[in-house]
Image (cartoon, helix red, strand yellow):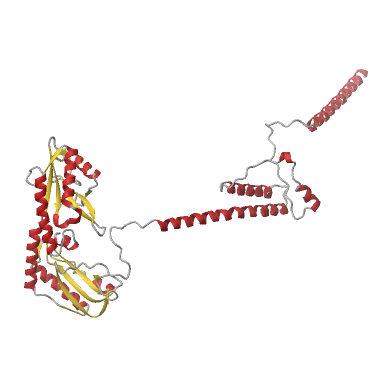
Amino acid sequence: MSVNMDLQTALIVAGLVFLGLLFGYNQWQIRKARRPRELRPEDDLPPMREPVVGEATKPEVAAKLHEAPPPEHVERREPTLTPATRPAQHEVAAVAASVAASSADADEAVADEVALAAAPSASAVAEPEMEAEAEAEAGRHAQAEVVPPAKVAEPVVPDGQPQPATIDPLIDCIVPLHLERKASGDRILPLTGRLRRAGTKQIHIEGLRVEANAWEPVTAGHQYEDLQVAVQLASRSGPLNALEFSEFVNAVEALAESLDASADLPDMGETVANARELDSFAASCDVQLGVNVISDGAPWSAAYVQNVATQDGLVLSRDGTRFIRYLANAEGVQRPLFALQFGDTNFLRDDLTVKGGGQITLLLDVPQADQGGKPFKTVCEYGYSLAQRMGAQLVDDNMRPLTEASFVAIFNQLEALYQKLEARGMPAGSPVAVRLFSV
Protein backbone atom coordinates (compact mmCIF):
# COMPACT_ATOMS: atom_id res chain seq x y z
CA MET A 1 0.00 0.00 0.00
CA SER A 2 2.86 2.31 0.82
CA VAL A 3 4.52 1.50 -2.49
CA ASN A 4 1.48 2.68 -4.43
CA MET A 5 1.34 5.94 -2.49
CA ASP A 6 4.99 6.65 -3.22
CA LEU A 7 4.46 6.02 -6.95
CA GLN A 8 1.48 8.39 -7.14
CA THR A 9 3.39 11.06 -5.25
CA ALA A 10 6.35 10.73 -7.63
CA LEU A 11 4.13 11.07 -10.69
CA ILE A 12 2.41 14.16 -9.30
CA VAL A 13 5.75 15.78 -8.53
CA ALA A 14 7.05 14.95 -12.02
CA GLY A 15 3.92 16.45 -13.60
CA LEU A 16 4.28 19.63 -11.61
CA VAL A 17 7.94 19.94 -12.55
CA PHE A 18 7.06 19.43 -16.25
CA LEU A 19 4.40 22.12 -16.11
CA GLY A 20 6.83 24.48 -14.45
CA LEU A 21 9.43 23.88 -17.12
CA LEU A 22 6.87 24.36 -19.88
CA PHE A 23 5.69 27.67 -18.40
CA GLY A 24 9.25 28.91 -18.04
CA TYR A 25 10.08 28.02 -21.64
CA ASN A 26 7.05 29.90 -22.92
CA GLN A 27 8.00 33.01 -20.99
CA TRP A 28 11.52 32.87 -22.39
CA GLN A 29 10.22 32.58 -25.94
CA ILE A 30 7.96 35.61 -25.43
CA ARG A 31 10.80 37.80 -24.14
CA LYS A 32 13.03 36.64 -26.99
CA ALA A 33 10.42 37.56 -29.64
CA ARG A 34 10.02 41.07 -28.20
CA ARG A 35 13.78 41.75 -28.17
CA PRO A 36 14.77 44.24 -31.03
CA ARG A 37 17.06 42.93 -33.75
CA GLU A 38 19.10 44.48 -36.52
CA LEU A 39 17.22 45.20 -39.80
CA ARG A 40 18.39 43.01 -42.64
CA PRO A 41 18.04 43.73 -46.42
CA GLU A 42 16.14 40.52 -47.01
CA ASP A 43 13.38 41.52 -44.64
CA ASP A 44 10.07 42.06 -46.46
CA LEU A 45 8.51 45.01 -44.65
CA PRO A 46 5.09 46.53 -45.37
CA PRO A 47 5.19 49.87 -47.22
CA MET A 48 5.24 52.96 -45.04
CA ARG A 49 2.46 55.48 -45.55
CA GLU A 50 2.83 59.21 -45.06
CA PRO A 51 0.41 60.71 -42.56
CA VAL A 52 -2.38 62.73 -44.15
CA VAL A 53 -4.13 65.53 -42.36
CA GLY A 54 -7.92 65.46 -42.54
CA GLU A 55 -10.52 67.99 -41.57
CA ALA A 56 -10.99 66.34 -38.14
CA THR A 57 -7.29 66.48 -37.22
CA LYS A 58 -6.45 68.82 -34.36
CA PRO A 59 -4.19 71.81 -35.15
CA GLU A 60 -1.42 70.75 -32.79
CA VAL A 61 -1.39 67.26 -34.28
CA ALA A 62 -1.39 68.69 -37.81
CA ALA A 63 1.63 70.85 -36.98
CA LYS A 64 3.54 67.79 -35.77
CA LEU A 65 2.54 65.77 -38.84
CA HIS A 66 3.71 68.55 -41.18
CA GLU A 67 7.06 69.05 -39.49
CA ALA A 68 9.88 68.97 -42.03
CA PRO A 69 12.10 65.89 -41.83
CA PRO A 70 15.71 66.27 -40.70
CA PRO A 71 18.03 67.62 -43.39
CA GLU A 72 20.02 64.43 -43.59
CA HIS A 73 16.91 62.53 -44.69
CA VAL A 74 15.99 64.90 -47.50
CA GLU A 75 16.62 63.35 -50.93
CA ARG A 76 18.06 65.83 -53.42
CA ARG A 77 16.47 65.74 -56.91
CA GLU A 78 17.62 67.75 -59.90
CA PRO A 79 14.96 70.01 -61.41
CA THR A 80 13.79 69.04 -64.89
CA LEU A 81 11.51 70.51 -67.55
CA THR A 82 11.01 67.42 -69.68
CA PRO A 83 7.32 66.59 -70.28
CA ALA A 84 8.00 62.93 -69.57
CA THR A 85 8.32 63.59 -65.81
CA ARG A 86 4.87 65.12 -65.52
CA PRO A 87 2.81 61.96 -66.16
CA ALA A 88 5.04 60.08 -63.72
CA GLN A 89 4.20 62.58 -60.94
CA HIS A 90 0.54 62.28 -61.79
CA GLU A 91 0.71 58.51 -61.59
CA VAL A 92 2.40 58.68 -58.15
CA ALA A 93 -0.36 60.92 -56.81
CA ALA A 94 -3.04 58.63 -58.21
CA VAL A 95 -1.42 55.53 -56.69
CA ALA A 96 -1.10 57.24 -53.32
CA ALA A 97 -4.76 58.16 -53.41
CA SER A 98 -5.75 54.61 -54.28
CA VAL A 99 -3.66 53.10 -51.49
CA ALA A 100 -4.96 55.54 -48.89
CA ALA A 101 -8.58 55.02 -49.87
CA SER A 102 -8.29 51.22 -49.87
CA SER A 103 -6.48 50.85 -46.54
CA ALA A 104 -8.40 49.30 -43.70
CA ASP A 105 -7.51 52.02 -41.20
CA ALA A 106 -8.09 54.98 -43.57
CA ASP A 107 -11.26 56.78 -42.65
CA GLU A 108 -13.48 58.67 -45.06
CA ALA A 109 -11.94 62.04 -44.21
CA VAL A 110 -8.46 60.80 -45.06
CA ALA A 111 -9.63 59.46 -48.44
CA ASP A 112 -11.27 62.79 -49.28
CA GLU A 113 -8.11 64.66 -48.32
CA VAL A 114 -5.95 62.44 -50.52
CA ALA A 115 -8.31 62.93 -53.46
CA LEU A 116 -8.12 66.70 -53.00
CA ALA A 117 -4.35 66.51 -52.84
CA ALA A 118 -4.17 64.51 -56.08
CA ALA A 119 -6.62 66.72 -58.03
CA PRO A 120 -4.37 69.81 -58.33
CA SER A 121 -1.51 67.63 -59.48
CA ALA A 122 -3.67 66.12 -62.23
CA SER A 123 -4.92 69.52 -63.39
CA ALA A 124 -1.38 70.86 -63.37
CA VAL A 125 -0.37 67.98 -65.61
CA ALA A 126 -3.38 68.35 -67.93
CA GLU A 127 -2.83 72.05 -68.61
CA PRO A 128 0.77 71.74 -69.95
CA GLU A 129 -0.24 68.70 -71.99
CA MET A 130 -3.18 70.57 -73.54
CA GLU A 131 -0.92 73.54 -74.28
CA ALA A 132 1.65 71.24 -75.91
CA GLU A 133 -1.03 69.58 -78.04
CA ALA A 134 -2.41 72.99 -79.06
CA GLU A 135 1.08 74.17 -80.05
CA ALA A 136 1.68 70.99 -82.03
CA GLU A 137 -1.68 71.34 -83.79
CA ALA A 138 -0.93 74.99 -84.61
CA GLY A 139 2.45 73.92 -85.97
CA ARG A 140 0.82 71.32 -88.20
CA HIS A 141 -1.65 73.91 -89.54
CA ALA A 142 1.15 76.37 -90.16
CA GLN A 143 3.14 73.73 -92.00
CA ALA A 144 0.10 72.82 -94.10
CA GLU A 145 -0.25 76.47 -95.08
CA VAL A 146 3.40 76.83 -96.03
CA VAL A 147 3.64 73.67 -98.18
CA PRO A 148 2.49 74.47 -101.73
CA PRO A 149 -0.32 72.34 -103.18
CA ALA A 150 0.67 69.46 -105.43
CA LYS A 151 0.22 70.01 -109.13
CA VAL A 152 -2.68 68.03 -110.54
CA ALA A 153 -2.72 66.44 -113.95
CA GLU A 154 -5.86 68.28 -115.04
CA PRO A 155 -7.00 71.74 -113.94
CA VAL A 156 -9.88 71.72 -111.46
CA VAL A 157 -12.78 73.89 -112.62
CA PRO A 158 -14.30 75.78 -109.64
CA ASP A 159 -18.02 75.49 -109.14
CA GLY A 160 -19.85 78.18 -111.08
CA GLN A 161 -17.18 78.47 -113.76
CA PRO A 162 -17.70 77.04 -117.28
CA GLN A 163 -15.79 73.91 -118.20
CA PRO A 164 -13.66 73.90 -121.36
CA ALA A 165 -15.77 73.36 -124.47
CA THR A 166 -15.17 70.27 -126.61
CA ILE A 167 -17.06 71.01 -129.81
CA ASP A 168 -14.87 72.53 -132.54
CA PRO A 169 -16.19 73.71 -135.94
CA LEU A 170 -12.96 72.50 -137.56
CA ILE A 171 -13.92 68.85 -137.24
CA ASP A 172 -17.58 68.83 -136.07
CA CYS A 173 -20.98 69.22 -137.76
CA ILE A 174 -22.83 71.48 -135.31
CA VAL A 175 -26.62 71.66 -134.90
CA PRO A 176 -27.93 74.58 -132.74
CA LEU A 177 -30.97 73.92 -130.53
CA HIS A 178 -32.95 77.01 -129.52
CA LEU A 179 -34.80 76.51 -126.24
CA GLU A 180 -38.11 78.29 -125.63
CA ARG A 181 -37.18 78.62 -121.96
CA LYS A 182 -34.13 77.87 -119.86
CA ALA A 183 -33.46 74.23 -119.09
CA SER A 184 -31.40 72.67 -116.33
CA GLY A 185 -28.75 70.04 -116.81
CA ASP A 186 -30.75 67.69 -114.59
CA ARG A 187 -33.58 67.79 -117.13
CA ILE A 188 -31.37 67.55 -120.24
CA LEU A 189 -29.00 64.72 -119.27
CA PRO A 190 -31.65 61.95 -118.98
CA LEU A 191 -32.74 62.75 -122.55
CA THR A 192 -29.30 62.34 -124.13
CA GLY A 193 -29.09 58.55 -124.04
CA ARG A 194 -29.07 58.29 -127.86
CA LEU A 195 -26.55 61.12 -128.27
CA ARG A 196 -23.35 59.15 -127.74
CA ARG A 197 -22.32 57.93 -131.18
CA ALA A 198 -23.64 57.89 -134.72
CA GLY A 199 -22.12 54.78 -136.19
CA THR A 200 -18.42 55.15 -135.40
CA LYS A 201 -18.50 58.95 -134.95
CA GLN A 202 -18.62 60.64 -131.57
CA ILE A 203 -21.45 63.01 -130.60
CA HIS A 204 -21.05 65.87 -128.13
CA ILE A 205 -23.67 68.12 -126.55
CA GLU A 206 -22.97 71.46 -124.90
CA GLY A 207 -25.06 74.18 -123.27
CA LEU A 208 -24.77 77.95 -123.17
CA ARG A 209 -24.24 78.71 -119.48
CA VAL A 210 -26.49 81.49 -118.22
CA GLU A 211 -24.13 83.04 -115.67
CA ALA A 212 -20.89 82.79 -117.65
CA ASN A 213 -22.30 83.24 -121.16
CA ALA A 214 -20.01 80.42 -122.35
CA TRP A 215 -20.44 76.96 -123.83
CA GLU A 216 -19.68 73.93 -121.69
CA PRO A 217 -20.56 70.21 -121.56
CA VAL A 218 -24.03 69.83 -120.06
CA THR A 219 -23.64 69.48 -116.29
CA ALA A 220 -26.21 68.68 -113.62
CA GLY A 221 -27.27 71.66 -111.55
CA HIS A 222 -26.51 74.27 -114.23
CA GLN A 223 -29.01 76.34 -116.22
CA TYR A 224 -28.70 76.73 -120.00
CA GLU A 225 -30.24 79.17 -122.45
CA ASP A 226 -29.40 77.23 -125.62
CA LEU A 227 -27.86 73.91 -126.67
CA GLN A 228 -25.65 72.73 -129.50
CA VAL A 229 -25.18 69.13 -130.59
CA ALA A 230 -22.28 68.07 -132.82
CA VAL A 231 -21.13 64.92 -134.60
CA GLN A 232 -17.48 64.44 -135.59
CA LEU A 233 -16.99 64.65 -139.35
CA ALA A 234 -14.02 62.32 -139.66
CA SER A 235 -11.69 60.08 -137.69
CA ARG A 236 -9.31 57.24 -138.43
CA SER A 237 -12.36 55.08 -139.03
CA GLY A 238 -13.21 57.25 -142.08
CA PRO A 239 -15.50 60.19 -142.95
CA LEU A 240 -19.06 60.67 -141.77
CA ASN A 241 -21.36 58.88 -144.25
CA ALA A 242 -25.02 59.40 -145.13
CA LEU A 243 -26.24 56.60 -142.83
CA GLU A 244 -24.39 58.00 -139.84
CA PHE A 245 -25.66 61.49 -140.61
CA SER A 246 -29.27 60.26 -140.70
CA GLU A 247 -28.84 58.50 -137.37
CA PHE A 248 -27.46 61.70 -135.88
CA VAL A 249 -30.28 63.86 -137.20
CA ASN A 250 -32.96 61.51 -135.84
CA ALA A 251 -31.42 61.65 -132.37
CA VAL A 252 -31.24 65.46 -132.46
CA GLU A 253 -34.88 65.78 -133.53
CA ALA A 254 -35.99 63.51 -130.68
CA LEU A 255 -34.07 65.66 -128.18
CA ALA A 256 -35.51 68.88 -129.61
CA GLU A 257 -39.04 67.53 -129.32
CA SER A 258 -38.52 66.51 -125.70
CA LEU A 259 -37.22 69.98 -124.77
CA ASP A 260 -39.70 71.98 -126.91
CA ALA A 261 -36.73 73.35 -128.87
CA SER A 262 -36.15 74.16 -132.52
CA ALA A 263 -33.17 72.64 -134.38
CA ASP A 264 -31.28 74.15 -137.33
CA LEU A 265 -30.47 70.96 -139.25
CA PRO A 266 -27.70 71.14 -141.89
CA ASP A 267 -27.86 69.83 -145.43
CA MET A 268 -26.83 66.17 -145.68
CA GLY A 269 -25.00 66.50 -149.02
CA GLU A 270 -22.92 69.44 -147.88
CA THR A 271 -22.10 67.80 -144.56
CA VAL A 272 -20.98 64.53 -146.16
CA ALA A 273 -18.82 66.47 -148.65
CA ASN A 274 -17.15 68.39 -145.82
CA ALA A 275 -16.52 65.10 -144.04
CA ARG A 276 -14.78 63.62 -147.06
CA GLU A 277 -12.60 66.69 -147.53
CA LEU A 278 -11.54 66.62 -143.87
CA ASP A 279 -10.81 62.91 -144.09
CA SER A 280 -8.63 63.49 -147.14
CA PHE A 281 -6.62 66.14 -145.32
CA ALA A 282 -6.24 63.92 -142.28
CA ALA A 283 -5.02 61.04 -144.45
CA SER A 284 -2.27 63.23 -145.91
CA CYS A 285 -1.06 64.13 -142.40
CA ASP A 286 -1.59 60.79 -140.68
CA VAL A 287 2.02 59.72 -140.27
CA GLN A 288 3.33 57.12 -137.87
CA LEU A 289 7.10 57.01 -137.77
CA GLY A 290 8.89 53.85 -136.70
CA VAL A 291 12.45 53.40 -135.45
CA ASN A 292 13.75 49.86 -134.94
CA VAL A 293 16.28 48.38 -132.56
CA ILE A 294 17.77 45.24 -134.17
CA SER A 295 19.70 42.63 -132.19
CA ASP A 296 23.28 41.88 -133.32
CA GLY A 297 23.25 38.44 -131.74
CA ALA A 298 20.80 36.10 -130.07
CA PRO A 299 17.10 37.07 -129.92
CA TRP A 300 15.61 38.57 -126.78
CA SER A 301 12.87 37.04 -124.70
CA ALA A 302 9.67 38.99 -124.14
CA ALA A 303 10.32 38.84 -120.40
CA TYR A 304 13.64 40.61 -120.89
CA VAL A 305 12.07 43.32 -123.06
CA GLN A 306 9.30 43.81 -120.51
CA ASN A 307 11.85 44.20 -117.74
CA VAL A 308 13.83 46.82 -119.69
CA ALA A 309 10.72 48.83 -120.64
CA THR A 310 9.38 48.80 -117.10
CA GLN A 311 12.69 49.94 -115.63
CA ASP A 312 12.78 52.80 -118.16
CA GLY A 313 9.42 54.09 -116.94
CA LEU A 314 7.22 53.00 -119.85
CA VAL A 315 3.64 52.00 -119.06
CA LEU A 316 1.93 48.92 -120.48
CA SER A 317 -1.19 49.66 -122.52
CA ARG A 318 -4.57 48.26 -121.51
CA ASP A 319 -4.60 45.69 -124.30
CA GLY A 320 -1.05 44.60 -123.43
CA THR A 321 0.34 45.03 -126.96
CA ARG A 322 2.72 47.94 -126.30
CA PHE A 323 4.54 50.02 -123.73
CA ILE A 324 3.89 53.77 -123.80
CA ARG A 325 6.09 56.71 -122.83
CA TYR A 326 4.01 59.63 -121.51
CA LEU A 327 4.89 63.32 -121.42
CA ALA A 328 3.01 66.19 -119.73
CA ASN A 329 1.82 68.94 -122.06
CA ALA A 330 1.58 72.67 -121.28
CA GLU A 331 -1.64 72.11 -119.27
CA GLY A 332 0.01 69.40 -117.17
CA VAL A 333 -1.99 66.56 -118.77
CA GLN A 334 -0.04 63.37 -119.47
CA ARG A 335 -0.18 62.54 -123.18
CA PRO A 336 1.37 59.56 -125.05
CA LEU A 337 4.70 60.45 -126.69
CA PHE A 338 5.69 57.16 -128.34
CA ALA A 339 5.10 53.43 -127.99
CA LEU A 340 7.39 50.38 -127.77
CA GLN A 341 6.30 47.20 -129.56
CA PHE A 342 7.94 43.78 -129.60
CA GLY A 343 6.57 42.13 -132.72
CA ASP A 344 3.07 40.76 -132.13
CA THR A 345 3.73 40.04 -128.45
CA ASN A 346 0.86 40.58 -126.04
CA PHE A 347 2.48 41.10 -122.64
CA LEU A 348 -0.74 40.18 -120.85
CA ARG A 349 -1.62 36.91 -122.58
CA ASP A 350 1.57 35.42 -124.03
CA ASP A 351 4.13 33.27 -122.21
CA LEU A 352 6.92 35.83 -121.92
CA THR A 353 9.58 33.20 -121.22
CA VAL A 354 8.86 31.44 -124.52
CA LYS A 355 7.98 34.41 -126.73
CA GLY A 356 11.06 35.99 -128.30
CA GLY A 357 12.39 38.08 -131.16
CA GLY A 358 15.26 40.25 -132.36
CA GLN A 359 13.46 43.54 -133.17
CA ILE A 360 11.98 46.27 -131.00
CA THR A 361 9.95 49.01 -132.71
CA LEU A 362 9.59 52.52 -131.31
CA LEU A 363 6.46 53.99 -132.90
CA LEU A 364 5.80 57.74 -133.00
CA ASP A 365 2.21 58.89 -133.76
CA VAL A 366 3.19 62.25 -135.27
CA PRO A 367 -0.16 64.16 -135.23
CA GLN A 368 -0.96 63.11 -131.66
CA ALA A 369 2.44 63.88 -130.12
CA ASP A 370 2.99 67.44 -128.93
CA GLN A 371 5.57 69.14 -131.13
CA GLY A 372 6.89 71.15 -128.17
CA GLY A 373 8.20 67.94 -126.59
CA LYS A 374 10.48 67.23 -129.60
CA PRO A 375 9.11 63.70 -129.89
CA PHE A 376 11.30 62.49 -132.78
CA LYS A 377 14.49 63.58 -131.02
CA THR A 378 13.31 61.86 -127.85
CA VAL A 379 12.54 58.63 -129.74
CA CYS A 380 15.99 58.59 -131.38
CA GLU A 381 17.79 59.25 -128.11
CA TYR A 382 15.90 56.46 -126.37
CA GLY A 383 16.54 54.13 -129.32
CA TYR A 384 20.28 54.77 -129.17
CA SER A 385 20.20 54.11 -125.43
CA LEU A 386 18.44 50.77 -125.96
CA ALA A 387 20.89 49.77 -128.71
CA GLN A 388 23.88 50.43 -126.46
CA ARG A 389 22.45 48.57 -123.48
CA MET A 390 21.10 45.59 -125.41
CA GLY A 391 23.91 45.04 -127.88
CA ALA A 392 21.95 46.16 -130.95
CA GLN A 393 21.81 48.80 -133.66
CA LEU A 394 19.27 51.49 -134.54
CA VAL A 395 17.67 51.40 -138.03
CA ASP A 396 14.80 53.17 -139.78
CA ASP A 397 11.63 51.69 -141.30
CA ASN A 398 13.66 50.45 -144.29
CA MET A 399 16.14 48.66 -142.00
CA ARG A 400 18.90 51.13 -142.88
CA PRO A 401 21.16 52.40 -140.10
CA LEU A 402 19.88 55.68 -138.70
CA THR A 403 22.72 58.09 -139.39
CA GLU A 404 22.98 61.82 -138.81
CA ALA A 405 22.08 62.52 -142.46
CA SER A 406 18.95 60.38 -142.30
CA PHE A 407 17.99 62.00 -139.02
CA VAL A 408 18.16 65.48 -140.61
CA ALA A 409 16.11 64.35 -143.63
CA ILE A 410 13.35 62.90 -141.45
CA PHE A 411 13.35 65.98 -139.24
CA ASN A 412 12.81 68.27 -142.25
CA GLN A 413 9.86 66.15 -143.41
CA LEU A 414 8.32 66.36 -139.97
CA GLU A 415 8.71 70.15 -139.93
CA ALA A 416 6.72 70.40 -143.15
CA LEU A 417 4.00 68.19 -141.66
CA TYR A 418 3.84 70.27 -138.49
CA GLN A 419 3.44 73.47 -140.52
CA LYS A 420 0.62 71.90 -142.50
CA LEU A 421 -1.27 70.98 -139.36
CA GLU A 422 -0.79 74.41 -137.84
CA ALA A 423 -2.03 76.09 -141.02
CA ARG A 424 -5.26 74.09 -140.65
CA GLY A 425 -5.64 75.26 -137.05
CA MET A 426 -4.92 71.90 -135.43
CA PRO A 427 -1.29 71.70 -134.24
CA ALA A 428 0.15 68.29 -133.47
CA GLY A 429 -0.83 67.17 -129.99
CA SER A 430 -3.68 69.69 -129.64
CA PRO A 431 -7.10 68.45 -128.42
CA VAL A 432 -8.67 68.83 -131.86
CA ALA A 433 -5.80 66.93 -133.52
CA VAL A 434 -6.03 64.15 -130.92
CA ARG A 435 -9.76 63.78 -131.64
CA LEU A 436 -9.29 63.81 -135.41
CA PHE A 437 -6.46 61.27 -135.41
CA SER A 438 -8.19 58.71 -133.19
CA VAL A 439 -10.56 55.86 -133.91
Residue sitting at 21 percent across and 77 percent down?
258
| Furthest-bottom residue in this view | 180
Front residue of 398/279: it is 398
Residue sitting at 17 percent across and 63 percent down?
432
Q: Is residue 321 visible?
A: no
Q: Is residue 265 visible?
A: yes
- Spot occupied by residue 108 in the image (x, y as percentages of width and height): 71, 53
362 up-or-down from 160: above or below: above
Residue sitting at 10 percent across and 50 percent down?
410
- Spot occupied by residue 192 in the image (x, y as percentages of width and height): 21, 70
Quadrant in which residue 75 is drawn: top right
- Spot occupied by residue 371 in the image (x, y as percentages of width and height): 17, 56
- Spot occupied by residue 243 in the image (x, y as percentages of width and height): 9, 68
435 up-or-down from 247: above or below: above
Lateral position of residue 375 relative to residue 158, left or right: left
Front residue of 355/267: it is 267
Lateral position of residue 268 relative to residue 38, left or right: left
159 up-or-down from 34: above or below: below
Instruction: Indicate the quadrant containing the C terminus: top left, top right, bottom left or bottom right.
Output: bottom left
215 up-or-down from 392: above or below: below
